Image (cartoon, coloured by chain):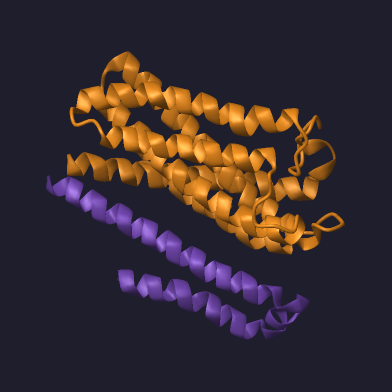
Amino acid sequence: MRKLTTLLAFALPAMGWAQQENTMYSEGKIYVVIAVIGIIFVGLAAYLFQLDRKITKIENEK
Amino acid sequence: MKGRIYKILGLVLVAYSLVYGLLTEIPDLPIIEQSIRNLFYHVSMWFAMVAMMAASFWNAIRFLGTDSLSKDTRSISLAETGMFFSFMGLFTGMVWAKFTWGAWWTNDPKLNGTAITILIYLAYFVLRNSIDDERKRARVAAVYNIFAFVMMIVFIGILPRMTDSLHPGNGGNPGFNSYDLDNRLRAVFYPAVLGWILVGTWIASLRYRLRVLQS
């Protein structure tokens, strides 16, 4: 379930972009930069949540 | 889930600043041009750092008042996170300086003040590691933390304002706001600052919990 959510988190925006190709190609391709930053951000957020969950798990074991 | 809202709020605000910071209209500024957008990213690192150090300072004082070691653990965790933000601010600032002021490092009072501040806080970590007894360590570290925080305010908040500086709002100017910062910038900058402070608090809390588990 978690893997599916993660997959969706990455796949949904990509599917959105495919439909909005015009947006992605306009405005000097600034949207491409936003997409890259967005991926890094989603990765960072997921990493923080994962770290949080791991620590919580160890705390509960103790 | 308890305490989850601020984490999500922080991430949402940071995400908003990352995306909208690149899309928003900006004032037409010479030399700086598009790089004014760094205001949302570079400057918010420093605001987050000062907030982390202020919280660390507050916990140091509370340790001295209560003698509870968890306050000391909070204090060090927040200082470590603040240190991370200060390095991020320093490196991003160096890149920005190179392309607007022409050098990676200038003798700007704010830059030198920051360098001194970082050294003062590095000494804080060294000082902590040099004392084995945890109560003694906590007490000495708390006293030093108070000194370090006051020095930080002096070196990055007061001294740069008393001489000429390349940074806006310094050198006798009334502040950042009056003519450099218009409302379009504010609408991204303030949420960015708040978002990074919340995310910083989250990271500091992770560090705190890790330290508690380790001890």
**A7 w.r.t. B38: above or below:** below
Taking the image as drawn, is residue B199 in sight? no
Question: Which residue is at the front of the view, A27 or B118?
Answer: B118
Instruction: Please identify the quadrant where the C terminus of chain B is shown.
Output: top left
Question: Which residue is at the front of the view, B161 or A20?
Answer: B161
**A15 w.r.t. B164: above or below:** below
Q: Is residue A8 left or right of residue B136?
A: right
Residue A24: x and y in percent read: 68, 80
Number of disc labels: 0
Question: Which residue is at the front of the view, A60 or B167?
Answer: B167
Question: Which residue is at the front of the view, B132 or B191?
Answer: B132
Residue drawn at x 32%, y 73% is: A3
Q: Is residue B106 left or right of residue B212?
A: right
Residue drawn at x 22%, y 23% is: B135
To which quarter of the image does residue B128 belong? Answer: top left
- The orange-coloured chain is labelled B
Residue A40: x and y in percent read: 50, 67
Residue B193: x and y in percent read: 60, 44
Residue drawn at x 44%, y 59% is: A45
Q: Colour of chain A?
A: purple
